[in-house]
Image (cartoon, rainbow, N blue to C red):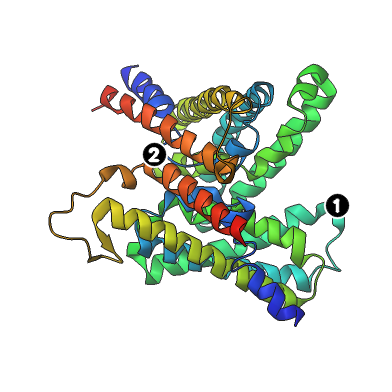
Amino acid sequence: MTEYILLIVSAIFVNNILLARYLGNCPFLGVSKSMDTAIGMGMAVIFVITSAGVITWMVQKYVLDPFGLAYLSTIAFILVIAALVQLVEMFLQKSVPALYRALGIFLPLITTNCAVLGVAIINIKEDYDLLTTLVFSFASAVGYSLALVLFAGIRERFAVMKMPKPFDGTPLGLITAGLLSMAFLGFSGLLK
Amino acid sequence: MRLVNEFTKGLWREVPPFRLVLGLCPTLAVTTAAENGVGMGLATTFVLVCSNVLVALLRKLIPSKVRIASYIVIIASFVVIVELSMQAYAYKLYEALGIFIPLIVVNCIVLGRAEAFASKNNVVLSMADGLGMGIGFTMALTVIGGVRELLGSGSVFGVHVMWSSFEPFGFMLKAPGAFVCLGFLLGIMNIIGAKK
């Protein structure tokens, strides 16, 4: 049990997928201008990363490994993720229209979010078992959403402030992300 | 003339990570040293040029409904080629770049150029576009890698250049340093761009 708790703390705070592993930065800077979109994106990411992590793990262990096709894993994973995102989109549209409207445009964007493929690859590289994969994927996604929501909260304040012209927008966003990342470095004392 | 233009736009006017703000993850992650920046840049350039050429060749055959999926498969195939050849011939670099080699698949620059340029233009123009963008991306990564290596370990391309009492900022090699460094470089680019 302790090892799972450690894994969760590590994935959310210490090795935050966005701020310490640098995955998924494009949507991070793209959709973090307002709190509502950040929350929508965060929910969609949690859902997709967790399910994609588990499914790609199964594809690797039950399809690619037995047939000696491990070198195809990059192609297989990206196709699985693209198909999964499509499926999730259709499923939500039919059965949970309210959630579909809330997540709306964020779902298709997730295919090219490198955090999804990144987590799938880390699961295989670290040789996790199924339960660890599930826990790690979920915790990483929660860490991603946490960073996204915190960042959006900071960024909303930018709108009312006076900025030096050349630094307005992305440059200042990046520097803020750097400061946030520095704050998260403080958590590294939690784990030995 | 058009050919030269498509090639040079990637070098300054539309340098991918600075001007278009695309492909940030590898830009931030692998640039702890100038050498890694060059390696990542060249790997991406290879994938960009090859996928642009193939997409341009097949642009009339791929039905527009499934085009994105087809582009991803084309890109992923070239990424696997890069991954396996690096594992065989440049193992040290392969270790240093880690999961960011397979992640070239989801680098928005590659898919972005396939969709925005190669699917509408002929093979030669697409190749020039891919090559220009790739070289621009490599230069950008090398500059960021160079700055971070200079401040973070006092050397450039592994050669020590700072004075002997120079205390390296370990901060620059960690994640926050990457964000802050890229933020400042973008700001400086904007200042230079605004003067012209």
- Residue sitting at x 75%, y 35%: A87
Q: Earlier in the sequence, mark 2 or mark 1?
A: 1
Q: Amino acid at mark 1?
A: Lys
Query: In the rendered image, which quarter contains the N terminus of chain B?
Result: bottom right
Classed neighbour count for the residue bearing mark 1: other residues with Cα under 10 Å, few (<14), some (14–19), many (≥20): few
Residue A177 on image: x %, y % = 48, 35
Q: Which chain does the numbered disc 2 sit on?
A: B
Residue B155 on image: x %, y % = 26, 61
Q: Is there any visible trace of residue B49 in the rendered image?
A: no
- Residue sitting at x 47%, y 38%: A175
Q: Residue furthest front?
A: B195
State the residue in front, B53 or B167: B167
Locate residue A155 relative to residue B87 in the image: left or right.
right
Q: Amino acid at mark 2?
A: Pro
Vertical relation: B50 (above or below) A26: below
Residue hosting label 1 = B65
Classed neighbour count for the residue bearing mark 2: other residues with Cα under 10 Å, few (<14), some (14–19), many (≥20): many
Alpha carbon of mark 2 to alpha carbon of mark 1: how far? 41 Å
Locate residue A37 relative to residue A18 in the image: left or right.
right
Q: Nearer the viewer, mark 2 or mark 1?
A: 2
Residue hosting label 2 = B176
Residue A178 on image: x %, y % = 43, 37
State the residue in front, B36 or A92: B36
Vertical relation: A134 (above or below) B131: above
Q: Is there any visible trace of residue B175 in the rendered image?
A: yes
Residue A65 on image: x %, y % = 50, 49
Determine the secondary structure under disc 2.
helix
Q: Which mark is residue A6?
A: none
- Residue sitting at x 86%, y 59%: B63
Q: Quadrant of residue B70?
A: bottom right
Vertical relation: A33 (above or below) A125: above
